[in-house]
Amino acid sequence: MVSANADEKKEPDNQTPTYSQTDMLDRPLMERYILDELKSLRQDQQDLERRLTVQITDRELAVADKSMNYANVTVTYFFYIIAGVASLIALIGWHSLREVKVNTTEMADKRLNKIAQEYEKKFLALERDLKRKTRIISDNNREIEIINEIHNLWLRAQSMQTADQRIEVYDEILKIRPGDLEALTYKADAVMAIKEYHWAMSLCNRVLELDENNGPALYQRACAYARLGAEEQAIEDLQRAVETSPSLKEAAAEEDDLESLYGNKKFEAWLQGDPEKTD
């Protein structure tokens, strides 16, 4: 396991960076890029929300305007029809005229009710669509806030000087996102620094239950196995870890937690890349 405490490690000029000291933990340009992307995403979402509100409002006004025009034209035509029919019915008699008036009124009421129901359904559909899009925008904003919060916690973890402090920060990340594989793996790395090897193995097993080919988790578990004296299991996990992440082989050659494997013929053959001796 690679410890993050600078005062616990020798730093020769030609030493290869260990697992926890690689550029995987110090990428300010990438962090700045991510923050800019997040900011741009939030602005785009705010612009989308504003445009949606304007478009929906314009659509509602247009629908209302069309509804009123349609009703006005319909009623006007009915009046024209009534006027024409009334002139004709006047010759037949007052009784027939009353019947025509009642029937015409009923027809007009039915038609207007039907139009009102149709537009009511359209307004309800627009309202549901607006609520759905508003909920999506709200969820996206919340996700951005969570991403920013987790990013700040990762930066805090990198600045911590002790393993116990890093473990506390990783626990905060896991409270926000339970089961975060990366946080569990880095927590196992910090736990190894305080010599809690069984705890570190348990954390690695949780990661491997969800991702059986997770290279960093396999590497950390190999370190725990080595510390506990299970050399065969340690070498097996190292082989699997390097198959997934070849760069871990260089870290293994300088790993303090693997000192118990030095002298093991299978381990030495694996480091030298001799497949016959590792079988």
Image (cartoon, grey):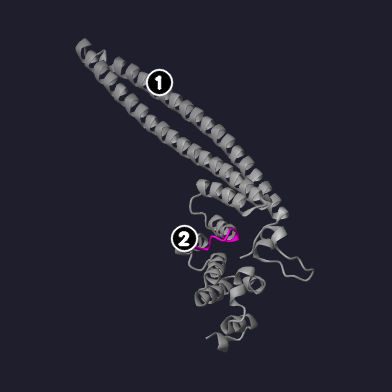
What residue is drawn where x is 53% and y is 76%? 231
Between 210 and 101, the one nearer to me in the picture: 210
Query: Mark 2 sits on what residue?
Result: 206
Q: Is residue 210 magenta?
A: no
- Mark 1 is surrounded, within 10 Å at the Cα level, by few (under 14), some (14 to 19) or many (20 or more) other residues, namely few
Disc marking residue 168: none
Disc nearest the viewer among 2 and 1? 2
Reply above or below: 231 against 72: below
Residue furthest out toward the right: 13
The residue at 25%/20% (across/down) is 103
User: Where in the figure is residue 127, as x and y percent of width and height?
Assistant: 44, 33
> Was residue 193 drawn as part of the magenta stretch in this picture?
yes
- Residue at image mark 1: 76
Magenta residues span: 192-198
N-term-proximal mark, 2 vs 1: 1
- Give the x, y percent position of residue 20: 65, 62
- Quarter of the image for residue 54 reads top right
- Tell me the kind of residue under disc 2: Arg
Q: Look at the numbered disc 1 and give the secondary structure of its residue.
A: helix
- Between residues 85 and 168, which one lies in front from this camera angle? 168
Front residue of 178 and 197: 197
Label 2 vs label 1: CA separation?
75 Å
